[in-house]
Amino acid sequence: MKVESDHSPGMTARLRSYQTYRVMLPPTQGSVDDVALGGAIVRSVNETLNGKGYRQEATRPDFFLKWHVSITSRKTPAMDAPAFRDVRPMPSAGTSGTSVMAPRQEREGTLTLDVIDSGSNTVVWRGSAHAEISGAGEPQAREARIQDAVRRILGRFPPP
């Protein structure tokens, strides 16, 4: 997992003075999977920020936290090499016996967390985690990966 963060240099002192927050929900959530994913993200954000001493404030928070997930798919070449216990017949003397390149589908996901100053309504800090998504995964494993990503992203907030 690759984690990155950036912030407005002139806002470092203000970022350190924040005490309250509110998580902004995305404008729409589609499938049941999207709702489950969003719930896991919000739970992880709340647990992590509360653990850092921030408290939720519904009416006048110091900052808003907005999240976004993007998932991309791409085909990559993969070597279709015979495995040790391959049951296919051995190539005949007249064939090359070389492996075949077969495309493989890879899914990559990025979770982005934006800290928006409530006074100026501008993004003042952004963190993201980018990783390959292997298979659908069990719900518990998926939630553990989300928790890990959120903790690692918010581990860089506020900036030193």
Image (tube, grey):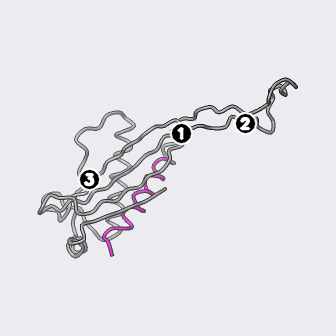
Label 2, secondary structure: give it.
Answer: loop
Residue 78: x, y in percent? 62, 38
Task: Give the number of callouts.
Answer: 3
Would residue 145 be counted in the magenta stretch?
Answer: yes
Instruction: State the mark number for residue 81.
Output: 2
Main SS, magenta residues? helix
Would you place residue 79 above or below residue 128 in this image?
above
Is residue 46 left or right of 88 when viewed as pictured?
left
Residue found 81% across the figure and 29% down from its top: 87
Is residue 96 left or right of 53 when viewed as pictured?
right
Would residue 138 be counted in the magenta stretch?
Answer: no
CA gap between label 2 and label 3 equals: 45 Å
Instruction: State the mark number for residue 66.
Output: 3
Q: Which residues are magenta?
A: 142-160
Amino acid type assigned to the residue bearing label 1 in the image: Gly
Mark 3 or mark 1, which has the lower sequence index?
3
In front: 107, or 62? 107
Residue 63: x, y in percent? 20, 62
CA gap between label 1 and label 2 equals: 21 Å
